[in-house]
Image (tube, grey):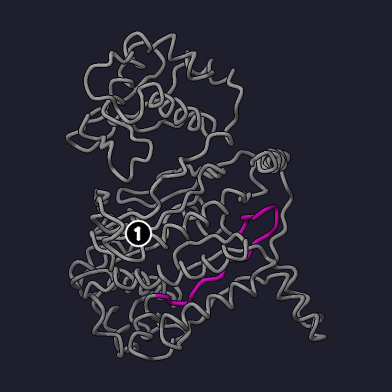
Amino acid sequence: MFVGKLWRQYFEEKFEQTGKGKRPKTLPRNQLKVLLLDLYVGWKQDPTMVIGVGLATASYKADSRYNALHISDIMPALARHAHEVGLIDWHKGSESARRTTRVWPTELLLKEFRGARFGLLDVGRHEEQELIVLSDAEFYEVDGKKKHRIELEYEDTDYPPIREMRTNLKAYNELLGRTFVDIPTLDRPFIEQFVTEKNGQSTKRVQVGQSNKLVRRIFYRGSWEFGGRLHGGWWQQVKSDWRKQIYINDEPTVEQDYSGMHVNLLYGLKGLPAVTDPYTVDQVLDMEPQEQRKHIKSLVLTAINAKTEKTAFQAFRGEQPKGAPAKSFKDVTLKTMLDAFKEKNAPIAEDLCTDRGVELMAIDGRITASIINGFTTKNIPILTIHDSYITSYEHTGLLRTMMNEATYEELGGLEINIDQEGVGIDQYRAFSNMDRANDYSYMLKSINTAERTQRYKHRLQQFEEYVKQKP
């Protein structure tokens, strides 16, 4: 009814099918529905939000596996007409410069949104949306510059595990769809945080909502051998101080991560046991030891992804915020830092600055997929931030077990140390059964309990009612 009214009033006469020519797989009216619902979701989440709409017909490939709704080159005409009749406003981008036009609803359209008889939770993703992505580039910044990624077409027969990966990931996303993930202290469902960019800091708003939970598995450089990490979910976009406050189904959570994941993967691939702290070396910089450790860790992780020392040093400086002392570190200083790490970690020194990053991401992608599949099979929700995982405080012991099993299987019997801040209630109960509860009573203080805002309670109630109504 909502879309039909606007279609008949503003679009039907201009876009009515004449029966001549090739009919699009998705009719113009249904493509208008996509545009309107995207605008509606953006407005409901954040009234200041704008969405991107490509105005070049070449931007739309109706037969692409990434275009489940078969949006065609009719969309630019619909957007232009919506602008002409006063339903949207825009800031036109330059298609040649790969700058998408940004659009937002006018007051005329907002009036219709306010009278809509559906809510944000009623607008879901298309069930056939592609979850396995083959990208032509890495999914991170190189030398401080964002690479423009292109999603490449492929056939399921190109790589035998594709179908199984998609089935597993679909089940995981369905589980996330039934899971309430939020932060109880938030009044409004978004987080504003400072992010470091090349020219300084800026404020980024992250939507903490049930419509921002889709997770996809992305492979890099046009190869099924590189990458395969899980990307998506608002929890991947917020910093650790916010992640500590996440609740899953209204329960506190605990985050666990592999200690020095990629460094220890390099050790493991050589059949060597994991090391506890590879980044603490002899003093080589005139600063506090912890500050030096932070810079060496950043440099080493950059070096693992770099092809040469020169590109590693350039990338390190590019990642530093404007005005930070480390941004002016000379190559000789950075080489001293890197050599100190190599001396302490001689068995893997030869692996630095040799472009090993995408290979290691493939390994941690498989490890993460194994953990996710294990939890999904048990119908227990879990959140992933690459080599870090968040579960309800009821399942921290299970997570630790699965993390150890996953690396044991991937690395032929070797394990990687696991870092955990705080303790799960299940772990505390285990200590209680060992008559050691008094010794560990202090652990209960680290469990994340928070005062729930009224708006959080309302969001939770709405979500629970929505899930009950779903077939």
**Residue 425 in which image quadrant:** bottom right
Q: Position of residue 468 (x, y in %)?
A: 70, 42
**Quadrant that contains the C terminus:** top right
Q: Is residue 334 left or right of residue 242?
A: left
Q: Residues within 10 Å of mark 1 (few under 14, many from 20)?
A: few
Magenta residue span: 244-261
Residue at left offset 48%, top offset 70%: 370
Q: Is residue 206 above or below residue 280?
A: above
Q: Residue at x 28, y 36 (%)?
A: 62
- Side (left or right) of 122 relative to 444: left
Q: Quadrant of the N terminus?
A: top right
Helix, strand or loop at disc 1? Answer: loop
Relative to 320, residue 397 above or below:
below
List x then y, in percent, for residue 384. Answer: 50, 62
Magenta includes 251? yes
Q: Nearer the viewer, residue 294 or 229?
A: 229
Q: Which residue is drawn at the image coordinates 28% and 13% (left, top)?
A: 18
| Residue linked to disc 1 | 324
Residue at 32%, 71% (x, y): give it: 299
Give the farthest residue toward the front: 19
Amino acid type of the residue tagged 1 in the rendering: Ala
Tag count: 1
Residue 77: x, y in percent?
A: 28, 20
- Is 119 included in the stretch rendered in magenta? no
Q: Nearer the viewer, residue 228 or 343?
A: 228
Residue 174 appears at what percent x and percent y?
A: 55, 51
